[in-house]
Image (cartoon, rainbow, N blue to C red):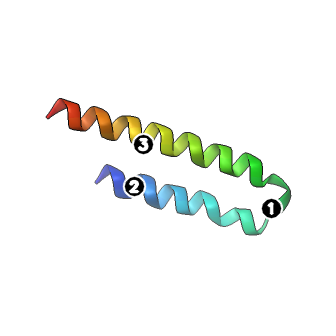
Amino acid sequence: MVVNFYVILGVFLAIPVYFFAEQVWLLLLLSLVGLYYGARQLVNEINSH
């Protein structure tokens, strides 16, 4: 399922935060971008049905 994929991807991207504290802002930005596109794809799938 697409939602589960993006949730796992978001968690996977969040893990390095604990190892690279200086780059938290960059990792958070990437996570937000991933969640944004995940939400858009989810909305597109809902609208297509």
Check whether the beta carbons of the residues at disc 2 and disc 3 lie within 8 A of each other: yes
Q: Which residue is mark 3?
A: 38
State the quadrant of the C terminus. Answer: top left
Q: Split into 4 quadrants, where in the image is the N terminus?
A: bottom left
Residue with the mark numbered 1: 20
Q: Amino acid at mark 1?
A: Phe
- Name the image quarter holding residue 5: bottom left
Q: Position of residue 12 (x, y in %)?
A: 56, 62
Q: Secondary structure at mark 3?
A: helix
Identify which residue is drawn at 49% across, 39% down.
Answer: 36
Image-based side of 44 in relation to 31, left or right = left
Horizontal side of 34 relative to 29 (left or right) equals left
Residues packed near mark 3 inside 10 Å, few (<14), some (14 to 19) or many (20 plus): many
Is 33 displayed left or right of 41 in the figure? right
Q: CA distance from mark 2 to mark 3?
A: 9 Å
Instruction: Please name the residue shown 25% across and 37% down the image.
Output: 45
Mark 2 highlights which residue?
Answer: 5
Residue 16 relative to residue 38: left or right: right
